[in-house]
Amino acid sequence: MCAVPKTDSQSGMTPITSPQNPVIKQLRSLVDKKARREHGLFLAEGLAMLERAAELGWSPGVLVATKPVSIWDDVRPLVVSEKLMATLSGQNNPQDVIAAFKPRFQPHPTKTGVWLVLEEIRDPGNLGTIIRTAEAAGVEGIILAGECCDPWGPDCVRASTGSIFAVPLVRMTREALISFMGAFPGETVGTAMVAKTDFRRPYGAPLMLVLGSESRGLSQDISKACKTLVRIPMKPGVESLNLAIATALILYQTVST
């Protein structure tokens, strides 16, 4: 975890302006996946997102702002210039506040509620949108199976609009997932273009909804492990839907039945 040195900027005096400040250099490195793994931190920015994190019991290792803010009683911001903040932000219009948090993965999924499984999802924007949708639909959590993109990357965190702090995430190998699916007490439903069953059907809980990667769909082994396969009907000639949209359609079908 970053250790924030005591500076005059923390008491509202002259903001830090140097990009060579060691804390700033470390935070800037977190845009890279390797650095996030090395430091065990990820970035989230914007007052609304950080207030959401605070409401959900997350506390940052480092809080950086262009002016004093009071989000956590026990965390004082490191005050920096707007120009320096722009070098930390991943947005065209930088936010006024950014924080570094330690990632959280749940060790095991439960066997209750609705679990969403994503096999080898690669697009962080899609993943963030799916996490946001999953929270809205009330899922129990999300299982990331196989080689998925990093949910703690800036594009995913930003696209989640704060839901990254609310939805439990579990990492599993394909082999562990297949074993868990075999012992799952409810229905395991996968999506496939060749499936004969329309997704617009009744669902119950506990339930696992299993979707594959953007380019290849479900792998053969995971597809075989599903008790049921469903498809989303589409006009002839249309190859597929965006994964985030397909996930939203199926998730909301489960909560409406």
Image (tube, grey):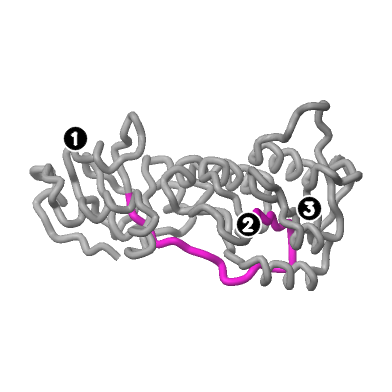
Q: Secondary structure at mark 3?
A: strand
Considering depth in this image, is 75 or 115 the residue closer to the camera?
Answer: 115
Q: Residues within 10 Å of mark 1 (few under 14, many from 20)?
A: few
Quadrant where the image shows the N terminus: bottom left
User: Residue 248 falls in which quadrant of the image?
Assistant: top right
Query: Between marks 3 and 1, how big is the CA–CA gap?
Result: 48 Å
Q: Secondary structure at mark 1?
A: helix
Which residue is at a point 64% across and 40% down the rendered structure image?
244
Is 112 covered by the magenta stretch? yes
- Residue 184 position within the rendered picture, expressed as x and y whole percent measured from the top left: 78, 69
Image disc number at residue 208:
none
Which residue was labeled with disc 1? 83
Which residue is at a point 61% across and 44% down the rendered structure image?
130
- Residue 227 position within the rendered picture, expressed as x and y whole percent measured from the top left: 86, 60
Q: Earlier in the sequence, mark 3 or mark 1?
A: 1
Can residue 129 be seen here? The reply is yes
Q: Is residue 121 left or right of residue 248?
A: left
Which residue was labeled with disc 3? 190
Which residue was labeled with disc 2? 142
Q: Earlier in the sequence, mark 2 or mark 1?
A: 1
- Residue 46 position within the rendered picture, expressed as x and y whole percent measured from the top left: 37, 40
Considering depth in this image, is 251 or 121 the residue closer to the camera?
Answer: 121
- Which amino acid type corresponds to the residue marked 1 in the rendered image? Lys
Query: Between marks 2 and 3, how big is the CA–CA gap?
Result: 14 Å
Q: Is residue 84 left or right of residue 223?
A: left
Q: Earlier in the sequence, mark 2 or mark 3?
A: 2
- Residue 254 position within the rendered picture, expressed as x and y whole percent measured from the top left: 79, 47
Q: Secondary structure at mark 2?
A: strand
Query: Between marks 2 and 1, how big is the CA–CA gap?
Result: 37 Å
Which residue is at a point 51% across and 51% down the rendered structure image?
164
